[in-house]
Image: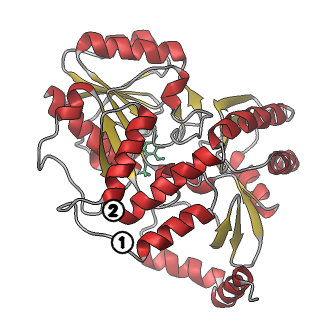
Amino acid sequence: MVNKGKMVEAEVLSMIDKDDLMKRESEAIFQTYSRQPIVITRGSGTKVWDSDGKEYLDFVAGIAVNNVGHCHPAVVEAIKRQAETLIHTSNLYYTENQVLLAEELKRLTGMQRAFFCNSGAESVEAALKLARRATGKAGIVAAERCFHGRTLGALGATYKAVYREPFRPLNEARFVPYNNSEALKNAVTKETGAVILEPVQGEAGVYVADAEYMRAARQICDDSGALLILDEVQTGFGRTGKWFGMEHSGVKPDIVTLAKALAGGLPMGAMLASGISAEAFRRGDHGSTFAGSPLVSAAALASIDVIKSENLVSISEDLGAYMKSQLAKLHPREIRGLGLMIGMDLDADCGQVVSRAREMGVLINSTGEHTLRFIPPLVVTREQIERVVDVIAESL
Ligand SMILES: Cc1ncc(COP(=O)(O)O)c(C=O)c1O
């Protein structure tokens, strides 16, 4: 029998000249990304391979996208089956997968209605638009260090001034310190349409919201009439050891945003709402050509099934605690996180640690100069975690 994996690898290896590809990329593609100097050609479970055939343990997981691992057979099978039946039609028509997925997301989040889109930033756009529609107010309050995306609306609610400044004027949020209820209370006024928060700030370096702060945020919104948007783009689908980050505090938002791990690696976002906001959009208020296509919806349904059937939520909780305890042995400045969403502050230069780890066959990334972030596929094993901790120790 022909080993298809080996064949694909051999074909890819013979075709790609890494240096040539990197040069062509620099000439053909806007230089908006700082890329690591490897060409990734294949992935399976927790591993990826580069164009030289080198194997890596992937603790970046497409930035918290590949929760069920790379190319999970159940997701691949669902995509193949759907691709042979119907890839795309228009939202001018009904499709079954989209409805099944909305019903599943309603069950999982406790929300009442879903709007589908294609990315995290789009789910935030949809949330901000919905909040404006529901309240008639443009004011947004967000947290310092937050990241909500780079489209013009989401960018206005993203903290880093270097991201925002070149693109002003924007509808900019008022930014207040995270985990500070008093500051939030003082910032929310009668003009505030929405407060937007991440249950765990991922891009900032994995800062976890106190449950008390989240409950205060709920109360402040209730008192002022502002809507509470929880951005679960990065924290969703088992990443934090619960299905969603909001479960750690028990706070129910008015609007929740999802993307990243939602469709097992295919691009998909969703915005869900309950209460008055669940009724606020009218026909034509929002839309997207590709949103909720039969293909991505099939991938999302399969991926959610895998998370359930392989108990990935509790694995994330258990192995996350284990990984934190292993990392603590390296005596870092600080370790933060929930489940398999972990940040570790170092005195060392994180960029160098990332490069050395990559040379030793481990992919991690740094958020900021002094924080390493670990967001592996939730199908990771204890042994793989031990190997990564060993590699970090050596890199240091
Ligand atoms: C919390 C959060 N919201 C929104 C986004 C934007 O998502 P996307 O890159 O899919 O537009 C991100 C991306 O990292 C995120 O972490």
Closer-to-camera residue (364/222): 222
Q: Position of residue 266 (x, y in %)?
A: 47, 61
Q: Is residue 371 shown above or below 192? A: below
- Specify the amino acid type for callout 2: Ser
Which of the image's four quarters has the N terminus? bottom right
Q: Position of residue 322 (x, y in %)?
A: 79, 34
Label 1: which residue?
87
Closer-to-camera residue (385/3): 3
Q: Is residue 314 shown above or below 86? A: above
Residue 267 visible in the current orientation: no
From the viewer's perspective, is 72 left or right of 265? right
Q: Are marks 2 and 1 in contact (CB under 8 Å)?
A: yes
Earlier-in-chain disc, 2 versus 1? 1
Q: Position of residue 61 (x, y in %)?
A: 62, 54
Residue ID at (59%, 47%):
307
Q: Is residue 29 shown above or below 328? A: below
From the viewer's perspective, is 88 left or right of 40? left
- Specify the amino acid type for callout 1: Ile
Label 2: which residue?
293
Picture quarter containing residue 111? Answer: top left
Task: Determine whether the residue tagged by mark 2 lies in a helix, strand or loop.
Answer: loop
Residue ID at (75%, 38%):
319
From the viewer's perspective, is 58 left or right of 98? right
Q: What colouring style does the render use?
A: secondary structure
Residue 96 visible in the current orientation: yes
Residue ID at (59%, 52%):
306
Decide if ligand 1 comes within 8 Å of the CB at mark 1.
no
Classed neighbour count for the residue bearing mark 2: other residues with Cα under 10 Å, few (<14), some (14–19), many (≥20): many
Closer-to-camera residue (240/169): 240
Task: Determine whether the residue tagged by mark 1 lies in a helix, strand or loop.
Answer: loop
Classed neighbour count for the residue bearing mark 1: other residues with Cα under 10 Å, few (<14), some (14–19), many (≥20): some
